[in-house]
Amino acid sequence: MDLFAKCREFAKIVQQAKDNHYYPYFTPISSEPDRRVVIHGRELLMMGSNNYLGLTTHPKVKEAAIAAIRKYGSGCTGSRLGNGTLDIHVELEAKLAAFYKKDDCVIFSTGYSANLGAISALVRRGDMAVTDKLDHASIMDGCQMTYGTVKRFVHNDMHSLNHVLATHHDGGTLIAVDGVFSVEGDLAPLDQMVPIAKRHGARLMVDEAHAVGVMGRHGRGTAEHFGVEADVDLIMGTFSKSFASIGGYLVGDAEVMSFIRHQARPALFSAAIPPAATATVIESLRILQEEPERRKHLWKNAHRMSTGLRGMGYNLGTSVTPIMPIHIGDDVRTMTFWTALYDDGIFTNAFVPPGVPPNHSLIRTAVIATHTDADIDEALAKFERVGRKCGIIP
């Protein structure tokens, strides 16, 4: 059989979706990624962004990026191990470690590679990685790169976790979970997970990609929200959400960070994040700490949007965050709904298998701090009109 046969079959499916005007992916935005975006010359209200604090358009963030390019140029041309370390990389790592009250930090080229690098470096032959069944793909892929045993537990089910951890083995154990689940919008119950991990001698790593800047009194994430920061061994995050940039990071004990810095293959064999991206994160971190009103406004928007959607009859599942998935189930109805929202000027994200389990297709919506009251009013009015038209709500 031709190796490319599967590609041709897949191409037919994609083309059919495009021909029928319900292909929701790779949509080119020709404006700043803000509360409103321009697509094909038309303005849409952005309700599917991870730009939680709205910092991608903050004047001081843009100025920091421009100043970094003027001083350092456009790229680093090498990995951190070799010639790619800049003094602002070291500065950022120190600031992030201090922010999380941890010993040290390692930054990666992407959040995806941070999970790949940390898990594959730590879990070796004889060790075990334990993950939630709804963890992000980067955690799953990091587990596949290990030579250890990989086991999964039922989503947020602590009895299932305890059962998995009771499995006898001689090596070490790493539990890796999302703090905020990026599609479902719910939280890992870290307050319950920590004592279970300790009882079994396991280490706990939390992916706070969608939690930093959002959860916790100071925006440090789910671990801060549950009051267990000192008990979480490793905290991973990304720069592509609240930090308005690109890259990833891991914070933890000094010895562990040193090991990962010298052993994580995605860090060793990838070029360092560019100067502009690094400076963007440094400035975004400063704003995150000095402007708590942004997080407060984000939550105001989230409560208004969530209350409005649930009141119309939408099924938002277990979400308790600014991420609000509209559960539909059927693939075709989901795509039809996405298209109708898009045509009415609302941009969202459509999730169908394999991004979600079969018969669990959904529309992922999210609010950001810079959405105005008028934006939320407009979004709710259009969700009500389109939802009734498509038969999603009564």
Image (spheres, rainbow, N blue to C red):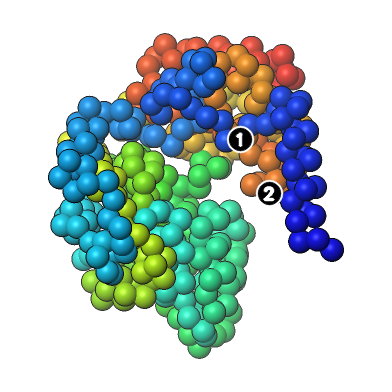
Instruction: Give residue 244's mark.
Output: none
Q: What element carries label 1?
A: loop
Number of dots carrying numbers: 2
Q: Is mark 2 on a helix, strand or loop?
A: loop
User: Which residue is drawn at the image coordinates 17% and 41% (left, top)?
Assistant: 70
Residue 222 locus on image (x, y percent): 38, 49
Q: Earlier in the sequence, mark 1 or mark 2?
A: 1
Q: Say which quarter of the image contains residue 32.
A: top left
Above or below, 364 relative to 370: below
Alpha carbons under labels 1 and 2: distance apart: 14 Å
User: Which residue is drawn at the image coordinates 52% and 38% (left, top)?
Assistant: 319
Q: Quadrant of the N terminus?
A: bottom right
**Relative to residue 61, is residue 9 drawn left or right?**
right
Residue 223 locus on image (x, y percent): 35, 53
Above or below, 59 relative to 196: above
User: Within 10 Å of the Cα at label 2, are there few (<14), some (14-19), or many (20+) other Cα atoms?
Assistant: few
**Residue sitting nearer the eye, 12 or 366:** 12
**Relative to residue 347, is residue 240 drawn left or right?**
left
Q: In which quarter of the image is the C terminus?
A: top right
User: Which residue is drawn at the image coordinates 37% and 56% (left, top)?
Assistant: 109
Q: Mark 2 points at which residue?
A: 354
Above or below, 90 relative to 58: below
Q: Mark 1 points at which residue?
A: 25
